[in-house]
Image (cartoon, helix red, strand yellow):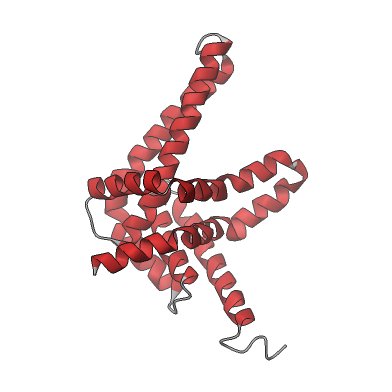
Amino acid sequence: MAGLLSPGTPFYRAWSSAADLVLVNVVTLVACLPVVTAGAALTACARVTMEVAREEEGYVLRTWWRSFRGNLVQSLAWWLPALALAAVGGSAFVLAGTGAAGGAGEAGVVSGLVIAGSAAIAGVLVWLVPLVAFFENTVAGHVSNAVRLAVGGLGRTVVCLAVLVAPAVLAAVLPASRIAVAWFEVLLGTAFAWYLIALVQRGVIDRLRDAAR
């Protein structure tokens, strides 16, 4: 057992990474509570989880805080519009479900458009967040690059979206798992999801970082 816990062993690295993800998840969830700061919190989470995916040594909380503080103001320029779009889409979806949007056919069209639009926005956001975390640019520049990456790397984008919706799908398909899923989300969920996304995006982000040097 002592050998497994020796620094440098695969078990030790995996255990250390899991502990780091728990810490990052807790501070990210706390920082998301004011809602308006969630964009910066997710950016900081993406920064740290990408470094964990690269097995880079560092102080995760210090890195998280530095990224959160450095991107807080700029994050409002893209996070608040995303929140507004989410509110509009959610309202339209609810109205369609209650029949206020018209007949069943019209409600189905509205629901379909909302789902498609939400998927498109989320697809851009999964690339926008790491771009903001690692690169200096204007908000417009980040968004433009995120759109190109989301479309150009459509396969990766779909995988990232699948990672994000997997817990909700699991809870819907297996109602008995909802308590377990809820605890997982509280303890590890957000950070683990962005860790998996980092593994998917790592090659692309690394190439962009090399090109920017």
Residue 184 seen in the current view: yes
Residue 36 image point, x, y percent: 38, 46
Location of residue 109 in the rendering, given as x and y in whole percent from the top left corner:
50, 18
Q: Quadrant of residue 201?
A: bottom left
Task: Identify the residue at image location x=46%, y=48%.
Answer: 157
Q: Residue at x 47, y 51 (%)?
A: 156
The furthest residue to the left: 138
Residue at image point 50% right, 50% down: 160
Up/down of 9 relative to 194, above or below: below
Instruction: Write down the quadrant of residue 108 in the picture.
Output: top right
Quarter the C terminus occupies = bottom left
Please give left or right for residue 101 compared with residue 6 in the image: left
Q: Position of residue 111 (x, y in %)?
A: 52, 23
Between 33 and 135, the one nearer to me in the picture: 135
Say whether residue 164 is left or right of residue 89.
Answer: right
Q: Residue furthest top?
A: 103
